[in-house]
Image: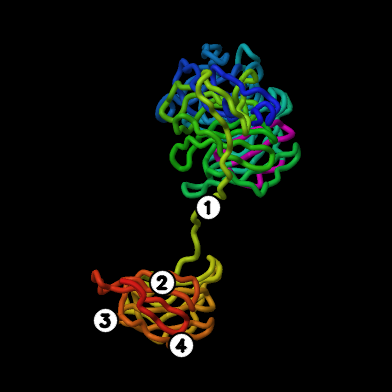
Amino acid sequence: MATYKEIKGVTLQTRDSDPVLNVGSWSSGGNMNTGRRAGHGTGITTAALAAGGQTGPGGNVTVNSEQYNGTAWTETNDLNTGRYGMGSFGTYTASIAASGYVTTIQTAVESWDGTSWTEIAELNQGRFYSGGSKQGTSTAGIIFGGSDGSPEDKTEIWNGSAWTEVNNLPTVRAYPAGMGTSTAALSTGGFQSPSTYPNSTDQWDGTSWTNLSVTQNTTRSVASAVNAGSTTSALIAGGQSPGATANTETWDGSSWTEVNNLATANETIIGAGSSSSDAWGSGGDSIQTTTEEWALPPPTSTVLTEGDLFLSQGTTLKGFGKAASVPSVAWSSGTNLPNPWYQDAGSGSSNTAALHFGGRESGSGSTAKTQTYDGSTFTEVNDMGTARRYLLGSGTQTSTLAYGGYTTTNVADVESWDGANWSTASNLNQARSEQKGTGKSATAALAIAGNPSSPSFKTEQWNGSSWTEVQK
């Protein structure tokens, strides 16, 4: 018998600790000294800066600034103007905090040099909850979107001494997520009205924005989420959707992918990071002090590979494989019927080729109406011969059998549809309504039980020309 080494070319390993999957996850970090929401946040997991934010209702804001070393937060020199909802970009030692809100919209901008904050040239357009190119520098970055009382699309670029209005976003957005630099940035998510959250993604090339044909998996307002990374490797987490969400997604330059969630659903989080493998988020909507850190397993970790076999703790044989992927399937809204309808029947081979017939329209008795559906429109066609409800149908849009039902009593009537007209077919042996049935064609169907029901009620089988009782 061949050995594992002969088959795989390696010796079966014994491990004191199991290998890990090479996927990102959130873990707890050190708590901030001042609980807050919607403040300035820049830097990476091991060198982060948080400043300002809201500490309570209305104008309860803080000027407090803190730096994070990956383990603990340390208070440092304060902002000159306390506010929340700022647009941000930069690093742990060189950052820009732009505009925001106290009891009015602010235009103030401050620059951080690693030691203190200095007031600099103000934005041309006061706004709050704007997006920013998080990976920009203190001498080169952009601020975009936000609200000046209503959602806006304006973009301003910073060159180290002045702000200049440049080409607008293609999508009006308050509360957008922002990541990237002054020459390559992303804007995604946001808020347009209480019922409209644009989850498309816009890309900045240093001159203008382009709306990409890409959406997030979770529609959300995400200036209030962790937003980190670049145009080729980014991450968003949390936000408002419309309530707080824990969902996390990564960006690979072309699409958003759902990954492991935050430990706690949260919004108005202060956060940043360098890429889809490095991000942090602190504070949040209930004026929190908690911090969560996102990371992949460290380079020293032993990572699981499909097909691995190993002895765990020297005694238990373990293996690792991956299940076949299952296509994602979800319900979505279609076109409404022309009127409220119930106790009706239908048939069809797909959601773009269906037939709807019989039943009751709201406020009326049984109907004989028949309609075709092409995926977007219901079209009335020729009526059935007998108006009835609680009937059943088997077949396709062009070949259907309608059987049983109720008028003023249970009926045994059967009709056949040829794509244009209904014609009478052989009756059921037993008049019935509310029956169960199967069949995907007009020539092969079953009628099972129904009303009236009894222990001896039989099943009937249709062969294309007649019904035969087959089983009780």
Q: Which residue is mark 2?
A: 339
Query: Is 187 one of the magenta-colored residues?
Result: yes
Residue 21 appears in which quarter of the rendering?
Answer: top right
- Tag 2 near tag 4, CB within 8 Å: no
Amino acid type indicated by mark 3: Thr
Q: Which residue is mark 1?
A: 329
Name the residue carrying label 4: 423
Please report the bounds of the magenta region as a residue range.
167-188
Query: Which residue is at 69% across, 35% downward?
Result: 231
Left or right of 167? Residue 244 is left
Q: Nearer the viewer, mark 2 or mark 4?
A: 4
Measured as percent of width and height from the top left, residue 132 is found at 63, 32
* Pointer 2 or 3: first along the chain: 2
Q: Which comes sooner in the sequence, label 1 or label 2?
A: 1
Residue picked out by circle 3: 409
Q: Earlier in the sequence, mark 1 or mark 4?
A: 1
Chain-order first, disc 2 or disc 4? 2
Relative side of 230 to 217, left or right: right
Q: Quadrant of the C terminus?
A: bottom left
Q: Is residue 396 above or below residue 209?
A: below
